[in-house]
Every structure is written in structure tokens, then in C-alpha cells.
Amino acid sequence: MANFVDAFFSKFDEFHKPPRQPKWSEASLNIKIPGWQRFKAADEWLAEHAHATAPAADSGVFERFLSQNGGAVSNLSTEEKAALFQQFLEWQKSQHSAK
């Protein structure tokens, strides 16, 4: 199970990129579902990689990203929104590394 978790979780960001289904951008490894229990290997992987799996939009981070990049999201296609979200994820990683 640990091998699967490492292989899947370490490539999880690839599911956020086109040509994947745009709904993947809503998926998060960090979400806890009430009544569900994670495998120990998954909990351990998430603890070890907490910096890489930080929640995508806590306390207005996505809005700050949009304001810094001057982009309005209205009238964007699904593919354009997915690309913008990917840019946001990359921006967010750079913000974490700058701290």
C-alpha cells in the first residue's frame, strides 16, 4: 500500500493539468471526510509532504493570486480555467518557498 500511495500521491498534481477532466482541479489529498479513515501509509505520506499538499485556497489566497495577475475569470473556457488554476498552484508553491 505504501508503494501505491507514494506513486499516486507524488504524481497527483498531474491530474490538475490539461487534458485531464477539469473536475480534477477540485480534488485535494488534504480533505478529510467525516466517518472515513485513511490508510496509515497515506497519513504518513501527507505528513512528510505537508508543504507540497497545502490547501489551495485558504483565506483568500486564490483571490490574491488573481489580483496580482490582473485576470478576470469570466468568459474563460474550461480549459483556460484549468490552465489558470495550474498557474495558481505554481504561484502558490513559489509563495511557500519564499517564506
Image (spheres, rainbow, N blue to C red):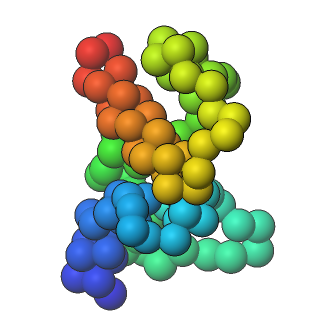
Q: Foreground residue, 72 or 94?
A: 72
Q: Position of residue 76 (x, y in %)?
A: 60, 43
Q: Foreground residue, 89 or 66?
A: 66
Of the 4 image quadrants, the one containing the N terminus is bottom left
Q: Position of residue 82 (x, y in %)?
A: 49, 51
- The part of the image, by quadrant, that contains residue 57 is top right
- The part of the image, by quadrant, that contains residue 89 is top left
Q: Foreground residue, 76 or 14?
A: 76
- The part of the image, by quadrant, that contains residue 35 is bottom right
Whether residue 87 is visible here, answered yes or no, is yes
Whether residue 30 is visible here, answered yes or no, is no
Q: Residue at x 60, y 65 (%)?
A: 23
Whether residue 22 sits left or right of residue 91 in the image: it is right
Q: Residue furthest bottom?
A: 1
- Rendered position, 7 above or below 77: below
- Rendered position, 62 above or below 30: above
Whether residue 18 sits left or right of residue 2 in the image: it is right
Of the 4 image quadrants, the one containing the C terminus is top left
Q: Position of residue 27 (x, y in %)?
A: 56, 62
Q: Residue at x 32, y 75 (%)?
A: 8
Q: Residue at x 46, y 17 (%)?
A: 69
